[in-house]
Image (cartoon, grey):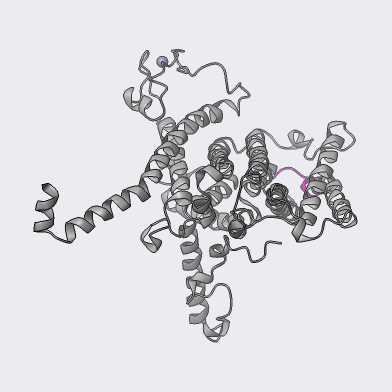
């Protein structure tokens, strides 16, 4: 009856509108439900991170005791412990002694929940409607085409890495230190996760869109050899055959000092170079071994090992890049440049997201650091938040997170930067015309050719 009425009044539009809505629902319903789960999962992860960032720097257990009020010791009831909602129900005060609870708790929970949701939408939102979906260019199409059921190990790697990056950012900004446990957990989860991902079925046509740049047999052998070599170095340090760097730091630098008084930064870099030598030797031996055993043909690469190799390669490139900058910077300036914590952080980024993101995020981090300096110069008189000295770790972490959940934004930013440089160079007359460099990668007339946009493209994978 109603259908008859409708079709008489609006013969075409009502019908097509209805079908269109049903179609829309069938396409987006799984995304909405999955996104809701991702958000709730993220809120719980954020709740755990709050415990982590308070207890790790002071050496307390992260499992026991249960959360309690730091002033009166009142143990939180289950509904007071709910992520985000608990703090709102309490209106930001302890229910026993009315002391204020920091809004950092609900804010971290909300942040991590939103990041998990953003990752889920960027990966799994429907592509069917082409450019109509706002998430069309957000990530490699591999995620959506594989579906969650056949890409969950990779998704777990990504969300654990995001959680670790948020935790490292907070701890580093507060204490200027990165607890090595966090990047270690992220790295182990990345190695295991990508290995397990390799055992899940995948159509051959999707292989070139795998979101982590995969490795050939030779590279995988070399990566394993380097990790074994570095293991030997750690054993040498543990058995006191090799001295750790900066052992006499406390003799020269007092508490709260910025470290510029330490006189032997250049000498200590030679100690760290000695630590790396067994790793490089191991990589060399393993590459020769791969050749001798005949593991050179690309046809014989097996999926689990090639993904694990890609993850290990990312770990080496990310950590190696920051360590190289640290060693060169310290040798050049005679004072410690970048912490070993930053080396661990970027190594973990590489293990989770592959070597390309580790490399590009490092350079994006430099721009974020410059932006932070400018911001803090402008706002330091209004808020103490901007008066602190910021270590490099948070910039690295923010850059990596942006690459994963907001890649179009990063591409846009690099594009804007390239345009500015282009116009400055053109206006000063250093370069004859923009067309003269038209073939370059930073071609402002053709933003599609910017390097970050090529992340998903596998052109130079092997
Ligand atoms: Zn209390």
For the image, the number of numbered tags is: 0
- Could you tell me which residue is drawn at 58 percent across and 49 percent down? 396
Does 27 sit left or right of 461 as displayed?
Answer: left
- Could you tell me which residue is drawn at 46 percent across and 49 percent down? 124
> Where residue 92 sits in the image (x, y, percent)?
35, 25
- Main structural element of the magenta stretch: helix, strand or loop? loop
Given the current orientation, which residue lies at the most extreme bottom position? Answer: 432
- Could you tell me which residue is drawn at 37 percent across and 14 percent down? 97
> Where residue 353 sits in the image (x, y, percent)?
61, 50
Choose between 180 and 252: the one closer to the eye. 180
**Residue 35 in view, yes or no:** yes
12, above or below 308, in the image: below
Does 56 sit left or right of 242 as displayed?
Answer: left
- Could you tell me which residue is drawn at 77 percent across and 45 percent down? 263
Does 402 sit left or right of 60 as displayed?
Answer: left
> Where residue 402 sits in the image (x, y, percent)?
50, 52
336, above or below 204, in the image: above
> Where residue 93 sits in the image (x, y, percent)?
36, 22
Q: Which residues are magenta?
A: 257-266
Q: If the image is split into quadrants, where does the C terminus sit?
A: bottom right
Q: Is residue 262 magenta?
A: yes
Ligand 1 is located in which of the four quadrants?
A: top left
């Amino acid at each position: 009856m109603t259908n008859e009425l409708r079709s008489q009044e609006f013969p075409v539009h009502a019908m097509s509108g209805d079908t269109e809505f049903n179609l829309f629902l069938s396409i987006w319903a799984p995304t909405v439900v999955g996104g809701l789960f991702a958000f709730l999962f993220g809120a719980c992860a954020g709740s755990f991170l709050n415990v982590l960032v308070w207890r790790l720097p002071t050496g307390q257990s992260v499992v026991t005791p249960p959360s309690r009020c730091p002033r009166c010791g009142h143990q939180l009831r289950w509904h007071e412990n709910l992520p985000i909602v608990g703090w709102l129900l309490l209106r930001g005060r302890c229910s026993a002694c009315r002391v204020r609870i920091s809004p950092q708790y609900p804010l971290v929970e909300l942040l991590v929940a939103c990041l998990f949701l953003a990752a889920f939408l960027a990966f799994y939102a429907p592509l069917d409607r082409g450019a109509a979906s706002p998430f069309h260019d957000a990530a490699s199409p591999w995620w959506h085409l594989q579906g969650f059921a056949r890409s969950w190990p990779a998704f777990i790697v990504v969300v654990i890495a995001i959680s670790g990056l948020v935790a490292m950012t907070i701890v580093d900004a507060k204490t200027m230190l990165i607890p090595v446990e966090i990047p270690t957990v992220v790295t182990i989860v990345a190695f295991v996760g990508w290995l397990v991902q390799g055992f899940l079925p995948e159509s051959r046509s999707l292989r070139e869109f795998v979101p982590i740049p995969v490795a050939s047999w030779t590279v995988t052998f070399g990566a394993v050899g380097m990790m074994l070599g570095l293991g030997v170095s750690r054993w040498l340090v543990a058995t006191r055959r090799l001295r750790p760097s900066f052992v006499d730091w406390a003799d020269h630098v007092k508490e709260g000092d910025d470290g510029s008084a330490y006189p032997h930064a250049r000498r200590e870099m030679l100690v760290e170079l000695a630590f790396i030598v067994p790793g490089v030797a191991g990589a060399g031996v393993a590459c020769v071994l791969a050749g001798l055993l005949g593991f050179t043909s690309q046809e014989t690469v097996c999926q689990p090992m090639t993904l694990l190799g890609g993850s290990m390669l990312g770990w080496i490139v990310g950590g190696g890049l920051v360590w190289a900058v640290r060693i060169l910077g310290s040798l050049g300036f005679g004072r410690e440049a970048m912490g070993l914590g930053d080396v661990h952080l970027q190594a973990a980024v590489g293990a989770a997201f592959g070597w390309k993101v580790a490399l590009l995020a490092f350079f994006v981090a430099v721009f974020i650091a410059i932006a932070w300096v400018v911001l803090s110069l402008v706002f330091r008189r209004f808020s103490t938040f901007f008066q602190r000295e910021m270590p490099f770790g948070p910039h690295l972490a923010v850059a990596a997170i942006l690459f994963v959940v907001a890649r179009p934004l990063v591409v846009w930013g690099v594009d804007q930067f390239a345009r500015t440089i282009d116009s400055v160079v053109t206006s000063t007359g250093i370069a004859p015309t923009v067309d003269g460099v038209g073939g370059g990668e930073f071609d402002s007339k053709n933003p599609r050719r910017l390097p970050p946009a090529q992340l998903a493209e596998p052109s130079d994978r092997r």
